[in-house]
Image (spheres, rainbow, N blue to C red):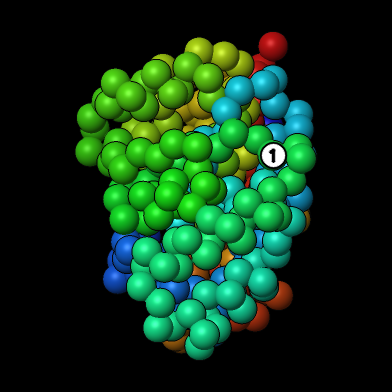
Amino acid sequence: MSESGTEWSGTGDTEGIGGKTRFEDIYDRPDPRAYFRRLAPLEYEIPQQAQAAFRRAAAERDGGTVLDLCCSYGINAALLNHDVTLAELYARYTDPEVSGLTSAELAVRDKEFYAARRRPDAAPVIGLDVADNAVRYARAVGLLDDAFAENLELGVQPSPRLRAAMADVGLITLTGGGSYLTRRTFDALLGWAGRPLRVSAFVLRTVSYRPIADCLATHGLRTAHDPSRTYPQRLFTDPGEQRFAVEAVRRLGADPTGREAAGRFHTVLYESVPAY
C-alpha cells in the first residue's frame, strides 16, 4: 500500500476529464431507467466492484452516517444496505415490463422492492449530487435517509442543512466522481465534520488523486492505496475514448497493458483514515 505523499502515480489534478465521455442526459431524469439502459451495454460495474469494500469500511467506521458523493440514484446505497446485486438492478430497470410505468408508479414499486431486501446491518446513508431529480428519487424510494443537490465545486459552502448533516458523517464513499470532483468539494465538506471519519474512493487511473489526498491530509486523514490492484469500471464508448484513457494512464506513470489497453476503464481504491 502506498501512503499519501509517496509512490504516487503522477502529479496531475482531477480538474480536467479530457476525452472521457460524459452522460449528462441520463444523470438527472425523474427515475433511473434511462441510466441503466444506457450503461448496460457498456457493462458499467464499479458499484458492484465497490460493494465489499464499502461494506467493510462501513463496518469499521467509528459510528455515524455514510455520505455517498456523486450518489446519483442511490445505487451505492442500494448495494451497501440491501441484498441485491447490480446485475439484478440492470435486469429490473431494463425490463420491458417497467417501461410503461410512470416515475411515480415505479417509485412505489421500488420502495417496496428495497424495503423487502433491507439488510439488518444497514447503515444510515445520505447522498450528495448536483442532479436534483436523481437524489430526490433515491430519497423517495428509501435508499437515502437524506439527500442534497448541491455543487460545492463552485467554491460555495455547504448549505446549513448539509453542514448539520456533516456533523455526524463517519464515512464518505465515492465511485463515480473522481474525474469531476476536486479538493474544493472535500475541503468544504470536511470543514464541517463533527466526528472522526474515513474516506473510501474508487478513482479512475486516468486522473491523479494526489491533490485530494493532500487536502484530506490537512484534515488529519492518511491515505493509502495499492496501485497493483485495480477494479474495472466499464467498457469504452469508442476508440477515441480508449486512446484518451491509455494516454492519460501513461502520462501518470502507470501501465495500461491488460487494463485500459484491453478495452475498459480501471479504478484504484484509495482509503483514508485518521492519522492518529
Q: What residue type is labelled 1?
A: Ala
Residue 20 visible in image: no
Counting from the top left corner in percent of width and height, residue 189 is at 41, 26
**With respect to residue 21, does 194 lie above or below?**
above
Q: Name the residue under label 1.
A: 122
Q: In which quarter of the image is the C terminus?
A: top right
Q: Which residue is drawn at 69% across and 39% down?
A: 122
**With respect to residue 223, does 265 lie above or below?**
below
Residue 43 vs residue 4, the one in the foreground: 43
How packed mark 1 is, by other alpha carbons closer than 10 Å (few <14, some 14-19, many 20 or more), is some
Q: Which residue is drawn at 60% across and 69% down?
A: 89
Number of disc labels: 1
Q: Which residue is drawn at 39% across and 18% down?
A: 164
Q: Is mark 1 on a helix, strand or loop?
A: loop
Counting from the top left corner in percent of width and height, residue 256 is at 62, 69
Residue 221 vs residue 159, the one in the foreground: 159
**With respect to residue 221, does 206 lie above or below?**
below
Q: Within the image, what quadrant is residue 64 found in?
A: top right
Q: Within the image, what quadrant is residue 90 found in?
A: bottom right
Residue 264 vs residue 121, the one in the foreground: 121
Q: Residue at x 53, y 19 (%)?
A: 168
193 sits to left or right of 273: left
Counting from the top left corner in percent of width and height, residue 268 is at 64, 52
Residue 66 vs residue 43, the one in the foreground: 66
Residue 93 visible in image: yes
**With respect to residue 101, does 79 lie above or below?**
above
Counting from the top left corner in percent of width and height, residue 175 is at 55, 52
Q: In which quarter of the image is the N terminus?
A: top right
